[in-house]
Image (spheres, helix red, strand yellow):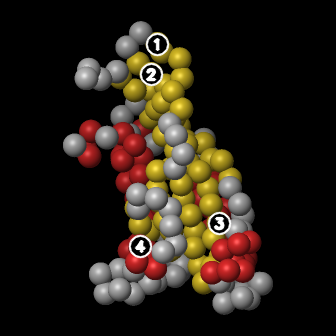
Amino acid sequence: MSSECLHYKCLTNTQSVIQGMDLTGIADSSVRILSVPTNRKADLADADRQITYPCVLIAPYGSETIGGPEAQTDDITYPVMVALIDQANQAQTTNLARNLYWRERLIDKFQYNAFGDAIAGNNQTTVQPLAVVDPAQFIEKDLWVSGLLVNYDVVQQRRTA
């Protein structure tokens, strides 16, 4: 059923777009879809139990927004969290420019972009920036964590139950 699930299509589209951006230093295998955005080591480890930083985590986040009905369609916004995670090593400036550049590129890529047939009825995406750097993660977990919310605005045909 995942092929019919629009929210899941938004997640996989986000992953494909980010993998195609050639963000130097982020391996395609480090761009992952999860159920919840987390930095638990068990969730970040690959099949060999290795954690590769930097990485990008993609997950559903918050709640969908449903707009006013039109004839046989609904306007639905599907929220997708994109989190950049890198080792901080308690260094305030090491990799800061690179990581901020990745964030800027992600904002540029997803702000007001249409993805056509990738998601049926997708009009466009918008970006809601979250914390540029999460201080608690930096201090307590020694991780540089930055978040964006990519909202997929979809005009969706109503489905019968």
**Is 46 or 27 nearer to us in this picture?**
46
The residue that label 1 is drawn on is 70
Q: In this figure, what is the number of numbered marks? A: 4
**Disc ID at residue 43:** 4
Q: Position of residue 79 (x, y in %)?
A: 52, 44
Asked if the residue at tag 1 contacts the one at tag 4, i.e. Cβ–Cβ closer than 8 Å, the answer is no
Q: Amino acid at mark 4?
A: Asp
- Earlier sequence position, callout 1 versus callout 3: 1
Disc 1: CA contacts within 10 A as few (<14), some (14-19) or many (>=20):
few
The residue that label 2 is drawn on is 74
Can residue 114 be seen here?
no
- Earlier sequence position, callout 2 versus callout 3: 2
Q: Position of residue 16 (x, y in %)?
A: 40, 59
Disc 2: CA contacts within 10 A as few (<14), some (14-19) or many (>=20):
some
Q: CA distance from mark 4 to mark 1?
A: 41 Å
Q: Amino acid at mark 1?
A: Glu
Residue plotted at (53% across, 17% down):
68
**Is 100 or 83 nearer to us in this picture?**
83
